[in-house]
Structures are given as C-alpha cells and as structure tokens.
Amino acid sequence: MSAQREMKEKNPWHTPVTIIITVIGVIAIVALVTVAVLQNRSLPQKYKYGIVLDAGSSHTALYIYEWPAEKDNNTGRVEQTHSCKVRGPGISSYASAPLKAGESLRECMQEAEQRVPGKRHHETPLYLGATAGMRLLNMENSAASDNVFQAVEEALQKFPFSYQGARILSGPEEGAFGWVTVNYLDDRLRQGLETTGALDLGGASTQISFVSDNYNGSESPSNSVTFRLYGNDYNLYTHSFLCYGKDQALRMTLAHQSQAGPGTVLDPCFHPGYTETKNYSVLYDSPCVSDRKPQGAPATFNHRGNGNFLECQKTIKSIFNFTYCKYNRCSFNGVFQPLLQGPFGAFSAYYFVMNFLNLTDTSIPLDAVKEKLKHYCATPWNQIRQQHPNIKLKYLAEYCFAGTYILTLLTEGYNFTSKSYSDIKFIEKIKGSDAGWTLGYMLNLTNMIPAEAPDSPPLPHAGYVSIVTIIVVLIFILFILSLRPLWPRCSKQPQIV
C-alpha cells in the first residue's frame, strides 16, 4: 500500500486539478478538429444556368452553360453542359415561312427544359444571337427579317425560361466574343497570360481577332474593341468579312466563273467526274452575288469538276482584292490588319473541314498540306463517294473547295506564312466547351467576368483552420508545462487510500 501511495505522490497526473485541465484540453482539441472537418466537408454543389441559341447562316445550335451558384461574379467557372443542333437550315432560310423558324427550335428547347433543373427555369437567362445569315437577310429584306425574329420570339417565350431577347450580332461583336470564349476557357484571362487569337469561319462570314503590340486602335478605330477583364486591359483587333464564309465564298467563286452565262462551268475546285445541273437564279439569290448575275443567261448550267488545286487557288483568289490599301498594311479588300501575333485558335468550319481532310495537325509543313490537298482534289468523284458513303453528297462535293479556300484565306488573305501557319491550332472544343462566340456573349451580358481580379485572403480556409488548430494545441501544451511548479505541491496533499 505504501508503494502505491508513493507512486501517486510522484505522479502529478493523478491530482484532481491536472486531470480536469487535461480533460478540458482534450475536449477543446477534439471540438476544434471536429469543427474544422465539418467546415471543410464537401457540400452538394448548387448551380445556375444560362442558354444561348446560335442562329447561324446554315444552322442553329443551342448551348446550355452552368456555373457554381455561390460564386456568381468572382471565381465561378462557367462550363458548357449540353448542346443541341436544331434540325433544318438556319432561321434566315425561313424568310418566306417565318412561323417555321420558330417551330424549328421546339425540339432543342424541350431538351433544354429537361436538362435544366425545374426550380432553376424561371431564373435561367435565354438568349438568341443571329449572325451573318440574318445580317444578309436584313440587308436584302428587313421586313422579312423582322417577321422571322417575331416568330422566333413568340416560340421562345412559350418556354419557362427568362427570355432576354433575340438580336443580330454585329461582325465585330461576333469576332470579339469568339476571342473572349477561347481565352476564357483556356484560363488565359484570369491568369493574365499571353492571349490566343481567334479565327472563326461560318457559312456567310469569317472573323479574325487578336491582340497585337503594334496596334493601339488609332489607325483603324472601327477594328478596335477594348476589354478590361480580371484587372487587365486588352486592346483587341477584330474584323468580320461578310460574304466570306465558306458557303457565300463558294457562291462568289462560281459567280466569277459564270459571268459570261455559259451552259457549262468547268470548276477546278470540284473532283474530276463531278457533274451537277444548277440553276442560275438559285446561285445568284444572295446579296453577296445578286448584282453580278449575267444578263441573257440560260435558266441552268452544267457544273463539272476537273480537280486542280492550283487552278482552284487562282479562281478563289479572284474574289479577293489585294490591289487597294490606304493603310500601312492590309489583309484584303482594303481592310487594315496589324502584324499577326501569338498563337491562334481556328474553330467552327475551320475545324470541321480540316478535320475531315485529316489536316488539323499544323506541325505538318504548309507545303506538305498543299500537296495532300492537291492529291485529294485530283481524286475522282466516284472514288470519293465510295470512301465516304455516309456523308451527304452536297457537303462531300464541297470539301475540295472548302479546304483550298481555307488555305487561301489564311495565307493570302490574312498573311500567315509557312512559319506562322504552325501557330494555328484547329479546335472544336476547349475543356469540354465548344469554341465559338456564344459563351463570350453570355459572359458579357451576365457580367460573369469581373473587370477587376477578385480579392482573396492570403490563406485558403482549410489551411487557416489547420494553422489555428496547431497553434491551439501548442498553447495547451505550454499551459500544461507552465503548471509544472505546482505539481509537487499538489502531490503532497493527503490522499485517502
């Protein structure tokens, strides 16, 4: 018994005061750690949504975007969650039957109803932006354009979303928003990195947008767009060439070859053996070529191919004007363009055409690309049809022209050289989202990109809690040690055994 008494007297942890302090300290530490764990546990994410309809010249597409609801105007990253291609042609094609333009959107809008949670419907903004197809229709027949928009608006307002209107984007807007999309998705804006230029090719227009150190906007103010994003200023050069999308460029090329109104057009941009009867009235039914229709031409002509890449390039170059430039330097048609700078992302028809031709790898020398295209164009039409039985003949027939047009536009029009051509990257998506103007358009209208970079605390929340926990533990240990002089005194108290 005396041995036990002696051990208790020597062991200060058996004293009531020390035990109480120890228990309280352990409880405090456990409570602090529990709070830290609960505070940092993963919570079910809440999202907000936005819908944009891209009403292009050849088709309409719907895109759904989502972002964290609690990070609305700061660090919430916007991502595309769904896309839907509307069946049928672009809304500008319904000028004579505008109600069908609205009806054509129903199927994709019903998909959007299913994809966006019902409780978010009323607060989800819905936008429709129309591009070059509607620009041309508005130039040609503004009343028909208004009727199409009225039918589209009536159709969209029947759905439970927050409809924000439909309008025609200007060419500079289309180019600038495409640039915003590409650089936002690549995290170049938030991190202040060198930006990527944007090359967009549609059916009726084409856009080029990039930041150049040699351009301050003074030489050609109409080509200048200024952004302040995440605390950085960007002076963007942008230009949109109406009628130089691949479909309208084909019309202009055919119009150039049929100026004399011949019964047969031998076209170097189509495969040998290709032949099709085409209508002069249909060919010239566009503001891009309507003033060139030959007088006294027959109703139809025989369109035949002979597949000659070099001759095709010469024919395509005839639709560009390289002789006039009032500025220090130009691209074509007297339009100012500064020196090309930085990498470029080429999307929309650029990607789809070059992907079909297996020419998206720009590490291949430009001369080798031309040789491959030369061989492709010279391939007989029957052989091309056998190799691609599942592609519509209209689209299949035009790939030789489209590929040659893209190379001509990039090298002759925009002045990409054999060296700078390798700076182009043909892209369809970036981190799961389609490259194009729609995301940039929605980001701008919803103010999702702040002008100034958001402030943030020096430490993340988890790191802050961990450091506080360690400091509390250290303080507790020091407190216990500070009681050490009292331990012998406590241990001498009489104890009942």
Image (cartoon, rainbow, N blue to C red):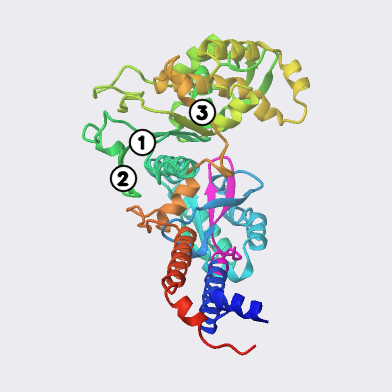
Task: State the image coordinates of residue 374 (x, y, percent, origin top left).
Answer: 60, 11
Q: Name the image quarter holding the C terminus.
A: bottom right
SS of the residue under disc 3: strand
- Dot placed on the residue nearer the N-terminal end, 2 or 3: 2
Is 348 magenta? The answer is no
| Number of numbered tags placed on the structure image | 3
Q: Is residue 239 left or right of residue 68?
A: left
Identify residue type, mark 1: Thr
Q: Residue at x 22, y 31 (%)?
A: 219
Residue on which disc 3 sits = 425
Q: Relative to 300, is 101 above or below?
A: below
Residues at badges 2 and 1 in contact (C-beta under 8 Å)?
no
Residue on which disc 1 sits = 238
Task: State the image coordinates of residue 132 (x, y, percent, origin top left).
Answer: 47, 41
Q: Is residue 342 left or right of residue 267?
A: left
Identify residue type, mark 2: Asn
Question: What separation in Å lies between label 3 and label 1 (alpha carbons)?
Answer: 18 Å
Identify residue type, mark 3: Lys
